[in-house]
Image: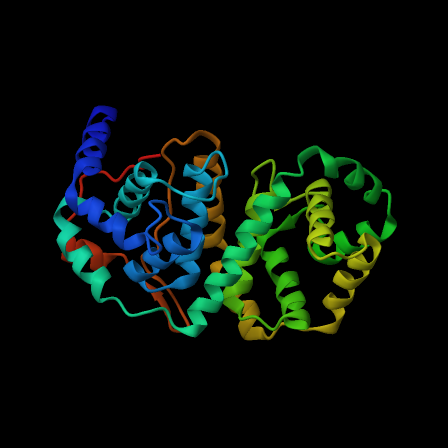
Amino acid sequence: MTSTTKKSIYASALSDERMKELFSIFDQDSDETLDFVEVATAIYKLQGDMDKSSFQAMHFFLVLDKDDRRRLDYEQFVRLLLNVFAGYGVNFFKAAETLIEGMKKADDIGLWDLSTLKISENVYNSHRDMAKDGESDIFEVMNILQYAKLHDLFNLYDTSGDGMITLEELLLACRKFHKATRGIDIYSTINETTTTMLFYDEDKNQKLDKNEFALCVVRFAKVSYTDLPDMIDFLANTIFLEENSPEEEEYMKFVVDFESKKIKSIQQLAENGSKSDLPTAHGYVMKGKEYDGDIYRKNFGTIESPELFA
């Protein structure tokens, strides 16, 4: 798809009355903007999985909300929706009426998914808040790197001993922490951990080095209103207090490759807004969790070459 073609599709979608109607459906409080909850809720109604919907909402806010208003206007919404359709190989102009009808008939979000959504919103907002601190955390990071217990904690997470914490290693450790402190489900652990990697992986290699890990711990202590040494001790203790079940470890190892691709895709888009290999979830099936974008192509038709309208 050429740049001219993409601009033409965008211009047509921008003035399409069906797109305007969809915006009004997304805009639950009628303030002519969309917040994180409204975007994630609408995506959920399209595909029925709140974990994936919340992560995609983070994706689009990172790419489109450059000035951190935490709101999307109509033009940004059009780009968002074209991206959602393109990711599934769906032609918006063929699918619009069916989509509007489906959105109007969609069931309300259940309590379980509402809880997942709230966790995701809090994670996203806290990370954006912490990102504003910028330089103010550098001195604390430098100081904490002189603290032997920080290195001991890093080594507990870095089970391979290669000097880097991979997404799999971070997942396994965070799952123990969540079980010891909050009792949230494994899907929320995956969502929060993937988001953590996304925000603190500054060199974009899908791993955390000691500096990146230290910054993460410093900011986590701040938002938890906990002294840094106490936080380090507590994080270390949860490694020993809890054990992951074999089923949990199997599942987390299973999803690591898929989640890493999502992180890489978002990093590329956030950096330059260019085309990237945005992973879809075709064939992603595990223990009753199935995501299949093929249903969209069967019902709505396809486009020649899906590209992102960033």
Tell how many labels: 0
Q: Is residue 252 left or right of residue 177?
A: left
Query: Is residue 25 among what the camera can see?
Result: yes
At 75% from the left edge and 52% from the top edge, which residue is drawn?
154
Query: Residue, x 73% and y 66% (percent of image)?
Result: 239
Can residue 253 be seen here? The reply is: no
Q: At x 55% / y 50%, what residue is drawn?
A: 125
Q: Residue 283, located in which quarter of the rendered image?
A: bottom left
Q: How is the image coloured?
A: rainbow
The spot of residue 193 in percent (x, y) is: 57, 56
Residue 278, percent across and down? 37, 44
293 with respect to 258 (left or right): left
Between 231 and 239, the one lying in front of the other is 231
Residue 89 at what x, y percent from top left?
A: 23, 47
Rendered position, 131 above or below 52: above
- Locate the C terminus by quadrant: top left
The foreground one among 185 and 22 is 22
Quarter of the view holding residue 29:
bottom left
- The residue that appears at 30% across and 40% down in the rendered structure is 74
Most extreme residue toward the top is 4
Along the viewing direction, whichever of 117 and 26 lies nearer the viewer? 26
Quarter containing the N terminus: top left
Where residue 127 appears, as percent x and y from the top left, is 59, 48
Towards the viewer: 165 or 196: 196
